[in-house]
Amino acid sequence: MDFTAQAKGKFKDRDTIPGMLTTKNAAKLLGISRVAMFQKIKSGEIPAGKLCGNYVIKSSNLPNIYAPLMLNQKAHINRFVDRAIKEYGITLKP
């Protein structure tokens, strides 16, 4: 997607376009680094378009993006919890 034609002359910078997020802002909301954001965009995991040469993400796509990331994070957290219980189980009991 190329949003340049839509936004040309309407906004001073891409941070003020309603319904659009910069990679920096989207990464912050998702709790991932900008590098991880670019990797996910390049792999097609996160749909993004270009605006004035920079990637932007439609904010309406965030719920679709956020849910799989949360499932991945939840699985990661569960592995650590299981390992902690296995190693320290008796000391964790009240």
Image: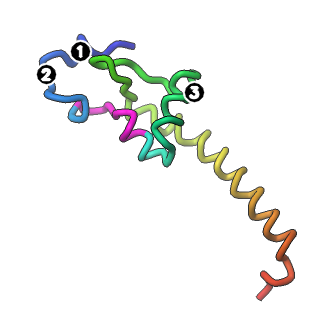
For label 3, the crowd category at 10 Å Cα-Cα, with few meaning under 14, some 14 to 19 and many 20 or more, is few
Residue, disc 3: 45
Seen in the image, is 87 located left or right of residue 48? right
Residue at the (38%, 38%) spot, across then down: 24
Residue, disc 2: 10
Image position of 8 with respect to 87: above or below = above
Residue 82 within the magenta-colored segment of the rendering: no
Q: Amino acid at mark 2?
A: Lys
Seen in the image, is 66 located left or right of residue 18? right
**Where does the magenta region start and end?**
17-26
Residue 23 within the magenta-colored segment of the rendering: yes
Residue at the (55%, 29%) spot, across then down: 40
Residue 80, image x, y percentages = 75, 60
Between the C-alphas of marks 2 and 3, the distance is 29 Å
Residue, disc 1: 6
Q: Quadrant of residue 51?
A: top left
Do residues under tags 1 and 2 come within 8 Å of each other at their CB atoms? yes
Residue 15, image x, y percentages = 25, 35
Q: Quadrant of the C terminus?
A: bottom right
Label 2 sits on a secondary structure element that is loop
Q: How is the image coloured?
A: rainbow
The residue closer to the viewer here, 43 or 35, is: 35
Label 3 sits on a secondary structure element that is loop
Front of the two marks 1 and 3 = 3
Residue at the (49%, 29%) spot, across then down: 38
